[in-house]
Amino acid sequence: MSLSIINTLRFITSHPLNKENKAASVLRYLKWQIGSRLVPGAIVYDWVNGSRFIVRKGETGLTGNIYTGLHEFPEMAYILHVLRDDELFIDVGANVGSYTILACAAVGARGYAFEPVPDTYQRLVENIRINHLENKVKCVNKGVGAVQGRITFTTDCDTMNHALAPEEQGEHSIDVEVTTLDFELDGQSPSVVKIDVEGYETPVLEGATRLLKNEQLHSVIMELNGSGNRYGFDEAMILELMSDHGFRTYSYEPLYRRLYLLDGKNLNSGNTLFIRDDALVADRLADAPRTFVNGRLL
């Protein structure tokens, strides 16, 4: 058995939604691995609160949801618990749309989903359509940065596609249009923003000055895993910027709906939760309806 399979099975069986029934989680993994080989192509998977997604072999972000219910458990559960119907959710680096589906199909929020890679963007659009979200979600086939322009992007890294650094070589890459959040969201007031841009967070925030000042924005979920080093960006500067706008860092325990104040970024997850109005958020987390995920009430 390869190390990658062992690590995947360890992740699946230790996932909080699988701990009480590890055998069923392994069975889901085996069914997908066998089925996706016997019947290649896309399938439609029924997910949370009547939401669905179209998944293909090798799409690790979506298959993780099949195995575990919620691949990125604390952050995805946070979306289910903190958002409300018809609020605005922004997904920067949407990939094929896991977070947007949760926010806009499972919860009922409105959304913007930014995805620069054309092939991935088309899969995102497919997932928006299958959930009948065309009138609730605006999909934008652009990268997001500090200024409008163009940039070179990888195309063969699945969920880890990223803007090429100045001296980085990419065998499979494409020139994409770049916009800013302040330009695209002019006049809009989102409640929650998710940013997953593989180290390009600093330019994204530089182009979101007005957005960050908007008091209706109470939560930002941001991937901070050291990838910014490829561009020479310092995550300490991101933490300082967010603090200057009144955000503090937290982790979230979904099973007990508890927030834990952090000193810096979340070292136990690739994502860090930034919250500006913790009293408002705590009330929302406590009041959110319970949701079935993998047969468990969350």
Image (spheres, rainbow, N blue to C red):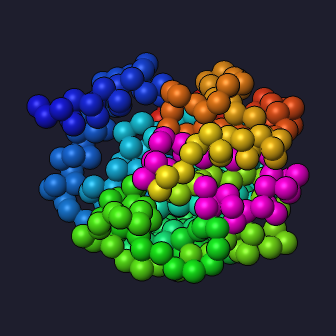
| Residue 16 sits above or below residue 198 on the image | above
| Residue 64 sits above or below residue 11 on the image | below
| Residue nearest the observer in this picture, 47 or 254 | 254
Question: What residue lies at 54% left-to-right and 42% top-to-bottom?
Answer: 224
Q: Is 207 colored magenta in this rendering?
A: yes
Q: Quadrant of the N terminus?
A: top left
| In the image: residue 218, left or right of residue 100 | right
Question: What residue lies at 41% left-to-right and 66% top-to-bottom?
Answer: 166
The image position of residue 180, as x and y in percent, is 66, 71
Q: Can residue 44 be seen here?
A: no
| In the image: residue 59, left or right of residue 184 | left
Question: What residue lies at 48% left-to-right and 41% top-to-bottom?
Answer: 225
* Identity of the residue furthest to the left in this view: 1
Q: Can residue 157 be seen here?
A: yes
The image position of residue 18, as x and y in percent, is 42, 26
| Residue 288 sits above or below residue 129 on the image | above
Q: Is 126 colored magenta in this rendering?
A: no
Residues rendered magenta in the picture = 202-230
| Residue nearest the observer in this picture, 26 or 62 | 62
The image position of residue 104, as x and y in percent, is 65, 58
Where residue 14 sits, quadrant-wise, is top left
| In the image: residue 245, left or right of residue 297 | right
Where residue 43 sits, quadrant-wise, is bottom left
Where residue 146 sits, quadrant-wise, is bottom right
The image position of residue 101, as x and y in percent, is 57, 57
Question: What residue lies at 80% left-to-right and 52% top-to-bottom?
Answer: 217
